[in-house]
Amino acid sequence: ELLARFRTAVEQSLGAFAFERRSTRSPLVLSARLSELSTESNRDRTKTQCRVSAVLRQRNDGTIIALARGRASAEQGRARASATEDVAMRAAIEGALGRLETTLP
């Protein structure tokens, strides 16, 4: 379930970035990895820390164009752990994708 939520968050976040339009050589492939996800909950709050890494490479020859990491934390009062995790994952993913985008010519 967690990896499915991570994949969905990556796919949804991709729409905000213009990787393909900026590439002139070949189509690009994005690989993303959930490096860390830790959640602490008590009856008053839920807090999550998340780290992700992302690699952008050319599809035709596998040449790595860029590598970036993103990290984020989220804290919500009396929230389900999965909701807080989703907020932290999305923020970390968008941080990594934003860094990748700025490296493209």
Image (spheres, rainbow, N blue to C red):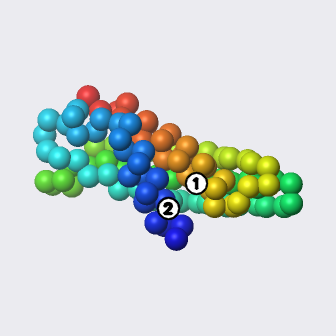
- Residue at left 37%, top 30%? 102
Residue bearing mark 2 = 5
**Image quarter in which the C terminus is found:** top left
**Rendered location of residue 65, percent (x, y):** 28, 43
> Which comes sooner in the sequence, label 2 or label 1?
2
Residue at the extreme right of the image, as rendered: 43
Give coordinates of residue 39: x percent, y percent.
71, 60
* Left or right, residue 73 beside residue 92: right
Where 51 falls versus 95 (above or below)?
Answer: below
Residue at 69% of width from left, 61% of height from top? Answer: 81
**x, y percentage for residue 15?**
35, 41
The type of residue carrying mark 2 is Arg
Q: Is residue 101 visible?
A: yes
Residue position for label 1: 86
| Mark carried by residue 55 | none
SS assignment at label 2: helix
Residue 54 appears in the rendering: no
- Tell which of 27 and 61 is nearer to you: 27
Tell me whether circle 2 and circle 1 mark residues in contact (CB < 8 Å).
yes
